Amino acid sequence: MISEILFIIGAIMILIGAIYDLIAAIGLLRFDDFYMRTHAATVGTIGGAVLPVFGAGLVALVYHPLGAQRFFMAGIAFTVGILILIIAPTGSHSLVSAVYFGKIGRKPKLVIDHLEEDLPKRSDVAELVREHEELPGEEEEPRFTFRRV
Amino acid sequence: MLYFAAVIYTLAFILYGIRAIKGPTTADIILAVDCLSFDMAAFMVILGIYFKSIMLASGAIILALWAFMLDIYYTKYVLYGEVEV
């Protein structure tokens, strides 16, 4: 009884994950902007990878043709699911920050950009660097030197 | 049921591959390869159940970690100009 319920729930999760994956692929192909594509890719990683992996773990728990190896398979499935759940948002966030601060590609037309207002201006940063710049001639001599024999 | 899921997954992989080939900037390629790797890890677990083999499923962990490594190294290369391990 409980095994059939787990099997049906796992199968439904795998099917919903596959449909999520197709929607994310269409979105990644059709959107015309990197940040919009990031939105589609997030759907693809969480809905399209984490959900079917947990469903596969539930199916593997009650799938008797695997024999005693089914617990091993379920453990691998849950490990992969938790791992993707942790590292996919981190990776997407670091990639978007690299694109924004590294100024890669063209910026989309925005109504307002609050992050750009809060960032320090380039002239202020240059002034700060000039204040903290070390004057030449004040460096200490290196204490240990290699003598040439 | 698994046939239907496998067909949809293959279609999605083809669409991701098109974006990974024609992406305008490097970040789009990295994003598409990232999605492709995570979904391929999920697909490998499902294939491991279908073929009754645990050797297929054990490669999924390494595939997921590899995609994460790609993101972090690209970010460090763009923002800091160097890749330190």
Image (spheres, coloured by chain):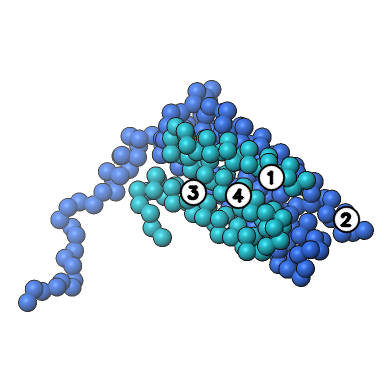
Chain colours: A blue, B cyan
Q: Is mark 1 on a helix, strand or loop?
A: helix
User: Residue tagged by mark 3?
Assistant: B71
Residue B6 numbered mark, or none: 1
**Quadrant of residue B57 in the image?**
bottom right
Q: What element carries label 2?
A: helix
The single residue placed furthest to the right in the displayed view is A1
Whole-angstrom CA distance, mark 1 to mark 2, is: 22 Å
Disc 1 is attached to a residue of which chain? B
Q: Is mark 4 on a helix, strand or loop?
A: helix
Q: Tell me the mark number nearer the camera, choosing from 3 and 1.
A: 1
Same chain check for tags 3 and 4? yes
Q: Which residue is drawn at 58% across and 38% down?
A: B14
In this rendering, position of residue A128 left or right of residue A80: left
User: Residue tagged by mark 4?
Assistant: B40
User: Residue tagged by mark 2?
Assistant: A4
Whole-angstrom CA distance, mark 3 to mark 1, is: 27 Å
Could you classify mark 1 by the number of other residues whose Cα lies within 10 Å: few (under 14), some (14-19), or many (20 or more)? some
Could you classify mark 2 by the number of other residues whose Cα lies within 10 Å: few (under 14), some (14-19), or many (20 or more)? few
Amino acid type of the residue that numbered disc 1 sits on in the rendered structure: Ala
Whole-angstrom CA distance, mark 3 to mark 4, is: 17 Å
